[in-house]
Amino acid sequence: MSVSSLAASSSRCTEPALLSPKEGAGGGGGLIQPLVPTGDHPYECEFCGSCFRDESTLKSHKRIHTGEKPYECNGCGKKFSLKHQLETHYRVHTGEKPFECKLCHQRSRDYSAMIKHLRTHNGASPYQCTICTEYCPSLSSMQKHMKGHKPEEIPPDWRIEKTYLYLCYV
Ligand SMILES: [Zn+2]
Ligand SMILES: [Zn+2]
Ligand SMILES: [Zn+2]
Ligand SMILES: [Zn+2]
């Protein structure tokens, strides 16, 4: 099964809302710095400076600023700017809960609800080191933390996915 491909693969460029607890991630002053347009992400949003790989992604991102909501739920008529917002919302009607807490197996409809739920476990963050049991709030801080462990401490079959405190079935 795919364990949390969402958190691992979504770039901060296309889905900033999913990775909101940024503090500690970059070790910087806490300011979110817009990416500079590069060959990889040449399309820049004139509203917030975020950069995107292609024009259609930029176009759908800009709806956040313009308030345009082309995605309509055929269950209740609610409108959304982004496709993934509609997809997440639609689970209200299907009852689908693709996120599962590894600590108590409670299911959640979306990533942010899962993160909120995790905090009820003594303030648990979405990632926990399997070697020293320390929590990390973001994947990048978890990866940084793992570099602090000696290679011989880390089991040979260990993968970063093992630090995820939730499972994701989407
Ligand atoms: Zn923008
Ligand atoms: Zn609906
Ligand atoms: Zn739980
Ligand atoms: Zn550790």
Image (tube, grey):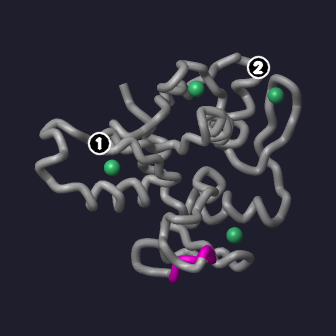
Could you say where residue 12 lies in the image, as x and y percent from the top left? 53, 61
Give the residue type that dot 1 points to. Ile
Going 61% across and 57% down the picture, which residue do you hit?
A: 21
Going 55% across and 74% down the picture, which residue do you hit?
A: 43
Q: Which residues are magenta?
A: 30-36
Q: Which mark is residue 131?
A: 1
Disc 1 C-beta below 8 A from ligand 4: yes
Could you say where residue 132 lies in the image, as x and y percent from the top left? 33, 44
Going 26% across and 41% down the picture, which residue do you hit?
A: 159
- In the figure, 6 relative to 109: above or below? below
Q: In the rendered image, which residue does mark 2 sit on?
A: 93
**What is the distance, in whole Å, between disc 1 and disc 2 at their CAs?**
40 Å
- Horizontal side, residue 63 vs residue 108: left or right: right
Could you say where residue 166 lies in the image, as x and y percent from the top left? 49, 32
97 inside magenta stretch: no
Q: Earlier in the sequence, mark 1 or mark 2?
A: 2
Within 10 Å of disc 1 (Cα), the crowding (few <14, some 14-19, many 20+) is few
- Horizontal side, residue 131 vs residue 124: left or right: left
Tell me which corner region of the image, top left, top right, bottom left or bottom right, holds residue 156: top left
Q: Nearer the viewer, residue 120 or 112?
A: 120
Give the residue type that dot 2 points to. His
Within 10 Å of disc 2 (Cα), the crowding (few <14, some 14-19, many 20+) is few
Give the tally of numbered discs: 2
32 inside magenta stretch: yes
Q: Is residue 56 in view?
A: no
**Placement of the N terminus among the 4 image quadrants:** top left
Q: Is residue 26 in view?
A: yes
Tell me which corner region of the image, top left, top right, bottom left or bottom right, holds residue 111: top right
CB contact under 8 Å: marks 1 and 2: no
Disc 2 C-beta below 8 A from ligand 2: yes
Going 30% across and 55% down the picture, which residue do you hit?
A: 146
